Image: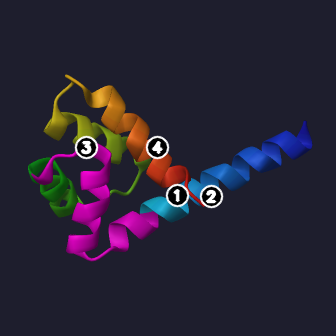
Amino acid sequence: MYNSHRQDENVGKRIYNKLSWLNELPREEAVYVFTECSGSQAWAEAMADARPFPMLEQLFTQAEELFGSQGFENVEKRLVSVLERR
């Protein structure tokens, strides 16, 4: 049980490190990453300009507000994938 909890902590730290990385990217690189998630240049630019995101909740809330709920599930999955990359 302890080992599982420790693994969860490590995953959480890694995701927040990725959030920090995403916040610190130059605008052009952030636009590229967000475009990978959505295919929408306009959405990617709006997301890059909305940074920094202090918490994951703000990232996903802003992402959905800007994208709209129609089709957001795929974008959300891709965002999660970016944050979970090693």
Q: Quadrant of the C terminus?
A: bottom right
The kind of residue tagged 2 is Lys
Crowd class of label 1 (few under 14; some 14 to 19; many from 20; radius 10 Å): some
Q: Earlier in the sequence, mark 4 or mark 2?
A: 2
Q: How is the image coloured?
A: rainbow
Q: CA distance from mark 4 to mark 2?
A: 14 Å
Taking the spot 16% from the left edge, 62% from the top edge, the residue there is: 49
Q: Residue furthest bottom?
A: 26
Secondary element under disc 1, as helix, strand or loop, is helix
Q: Is residue 70 magenta?
A: no
- Tag 1 residue: 16
Taking the spot 19% from the left edge, 22% from the top edge, the residue there is: 70
Residue 52 visible in the snapshot: no
- Tag 2 residue: 13
Which is closer to the viewer, label 3 or label 4?
3
CB contact under 8 Å: marks 4 and 2:
no
Q: CA distance from mark 4 to mark 1?
A: 11 Å
The spot of residue 57 in percent (x, y) is: 38, 41
The kind of residue tagged 1 is Tyr
- Tag 3 residue: 38
Q: Residue furthest top?
A: 70
Query: Which numbered dot is residue 62?
Result: none
Residue interval drawn in magenta: 20-41
CB contact under 8 Å: marks 1 and 2:
yes
Of helix, strand and loop, which mostly describes the magenta segment?
Answer: helix
The spot of residue 6 in percent (x, y) is: 81, 49
